[in-house]
Image (spheres, helix red, strand yellow):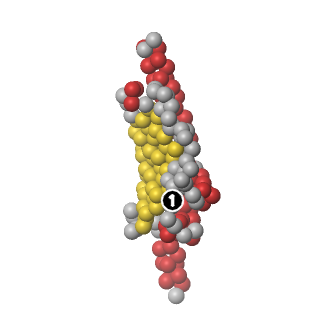
């Protein structure tokens, strides 16, 4: 009987093989060349990929792999299941602000998926999920790309005087 309990406990810890988290950020409506965006993809093994794209006039994009905590992605999955997030209908708020940055997330697990829009009506729950997901993103990656982007913007502006 104890072996069955142990196997069941291990199964509860396992993440679905197709479990993925995709987080997207866009700086919003700012003048070229200041706009930028990035996407983070994380799979069930904790393997992540960031794609950081400065404004189109800078004609470049950077990608880099990283590894994040499997424990943290498991915690997010458990929260999504226990909170009923996979069963919610995530809807966009009708009165979105004009301009400003946007972020959204898509999570897939088994035959379920959720997409949390940039300005959801379910703000409190969405904020909690976004906070957990942002914790997965290595801060040094975003900071290093911001420094690279700023150097490109500076060179672009000096070259277009």
On screen, 8 above or below 90? Answer: below
**Residue at the image position 56 percent from the left and 50 percent from the top:** 95
Residue 148: percent from left, percent from top: 48, 28
Which residue extends farthest left? 59
User: Dividing the image into 4 quarters, which one contains the C terminus?
Assistant: top left
**Residue at the image position 44 percent from the left and 19 percent from the top:** 156
Which residue extends farthest right? 124
Q: Secondary structure at mark 1?
A: loop
**Residue at the image position 39 percent from the left and 30 percent from the top:** 56
Residue 45 showing in the rendered view? no
Residue 34: percent from left, percent from top: 49, 28
Residue 46: percent from left, percent from top: 46, 54
Q: Nearer the viewer, residue 126 or 143?
A: 126
Q: Nearer the viewer, residue 114 or 150?
A: 114
In-image side of 82 versus 114 (left or right): right
Residue position marked by numbered label 1 in the rendering:
91
Which residue extends farthest bottom? 1
Q: How many marks?
A: 1
Residue 47 showing in the rendered view? yes
Mark 1 Cα-neighbour bin, 10 Å: few <14, some 14–19, many ≥20: some
Which residue extends farthest front? 95
**Residue at the image position 39 percent from the left and 34 percent from the top:** 61
């Amino acid at each position: 009987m104890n072996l069955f309990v142990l196997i069941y406990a291990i199964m509860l810890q396992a993440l679905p093989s197709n479990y993925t988290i995709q987080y997207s950020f866009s700086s919003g409506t700012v003048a070229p060349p200041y706009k930028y965006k990035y996407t983070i993809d994380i799979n069930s093994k904790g393997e992540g990929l960031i794609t950081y794209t400065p404004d189109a006039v800078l004609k470049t994009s950077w990608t880099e792999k990283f590894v994040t905590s499997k424990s943290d992605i498991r915690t997010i999955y458990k929260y999504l299941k226990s909170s009923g997030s996979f069963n919610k209908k995530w809807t966009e708020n009708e009165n979105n602000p004009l301009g400003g940055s946007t972020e959204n997330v898509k999570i897939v697990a088994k035959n379920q998926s959720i997409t949390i829009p940039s300005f959801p009506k379910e703000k409190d729950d969405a904020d909690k999920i976004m906070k957990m997901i942002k914790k997965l993103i290595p801060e040094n990656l975003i900071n290093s790309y911001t420094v690279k982007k700023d150097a490109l913007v500076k060179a672009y502006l000096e070259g277009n005087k």
